Amino acid sequence: MSESRGSPAPGKSKITEGEADLYLDQYNFTTTAAIVGSVDRKIFVLLRDGRMLFGILRTFDQYANLILQHCVERIYITEENKYAENECGVFMVRGENVVMLGEVDIDKEDEPLVQMEQIPFEEASQMKQERDDARYKSESQKGRQMARYGLIHDFHKSDIY
Amino acid sequence: MLPLYLLTNSNGQHMLIELKNGDTVQGQLTNVDNWMNLTLADVTHTASNEVITLPEIYVRGNFIKYIKLQQDVIEKVKQSSAQQQSQGHHQNRDFRRRQGGGGNRRDNDRRFNQGGNQKRNEGRGSHYNGGNRRYNNQRQSNDGNHSSAMGGFVQHHQTSAQQPASLGHN
């Protein structure tokens, strides 16, 4: 059907969109190209500092720098069955700080949330801060203990995830 | 449109930058380079609870965690780049249309389109019907290649030789 009008010059064949998809399906991308399929979808991003972002992926590049639109930061306090949300608009995340990301099923996204209590974001972020501090304390203690046995326990304050 | 392209084209806009150490810097973007190094003007620097205002600041790209941009950056940059393109080319070649149009993209459903500020709860409770889950927006109707404008790598390549159809007629 692509030949019907203005067919491309022989030899310089252009592939159709369907063919392009076929090729894309065949490759197992393990580089950042793996997330082409998630463009314009709602995704979840975990950052190295433990932040969870939800937003629509608009673009990305080879470093996994991301542009997220209608971005929401969410904090879960699972022990108390609470959560908090903060809307942040358009977000550009530097790829270095991304731990993982994945598509969100917008049908099922809210199912766990209805059973949880929403609390103000400031309150939640303070609770998270305390939790992170406690975590840091215990991890560095663990590090010291392991060092006594000549073992290395790698932990950085910026890597609370 | 790559993330850095968006940034380089949003000069003069207000933004909030969080650094890797948790400090935040707020100001007007004056310059960006390929390493995401930035210079900002009219800066408010916040470190835990200490606030400093500065006329200018340089941020090394390396040390950025994320940037919170203005709500309308994507729109604005898209507009300005479309303007540039229409000044560059005069032909309106729409490869995608000639090939019988989209619609057969493997995963054409469920994509969020530009400008759709939908309610989150819309359509909740119903099972996925495999069908038209695209959130409506105004561009979709008059524009055959709606997915190309903000697309990722693949879409960008396929459509790089063309300009948005809606802008081609002036």
Image (tube, coloured by chain):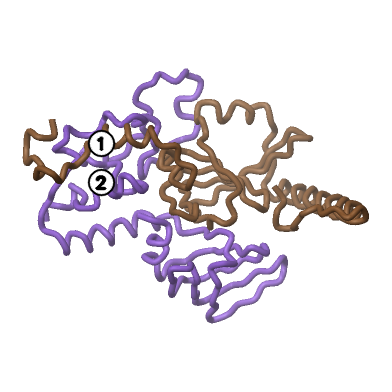
Chain colours: A brown, B purple
Q: Residues within 10 Å of mark 1 (few under 14, many from 20)?
A: many
Residue B74 lies in what quarter of the image?
A: bottom left
Residue A100 lies in what quarter of the image?
A: top right
Where does residue A126 sit, x and y in percent of width and height?
75, 51
> Please, what secondary structure does the residue beneath circle 2 have?
helix
Asked if residue A20 is positioned above or below residue B78 in the image, the reply reads above
> Please, what secondary structure does the residue beneath circle 1 have?
helix
Where does residue A102 sit, x and y in percent of width and height?
53, 38
Extreme residue in the left direction = A5
Asked if residue B90 is positioned above or below residue A55 in the image, the reply reads below
The quadrant of the picture occupied by the C terminus of chain B is bottom left
Where does residue A17 sit, x and y in percent of width and height?
25, 36
Asked if residue B141 is positioned above or below residue B74 in the image, the reply reads above
**What residue did someone put label 2 on?**
B158
Q: Label 1 marks which chain's residue?
A: A
Q: Residue at x 70, y 51 (%)?
A: A122
Q: Is residue B117 in view? A: no
Where does residue A73 sit, x and y in percent of width and height?
59, 46
Front-lying residue, A35 or A119: A35
For residue A17, the mark is 1
| Residue contact at pointers 2 and 1, CB within 8 angstroms | yes
For residue B84, the mark is none
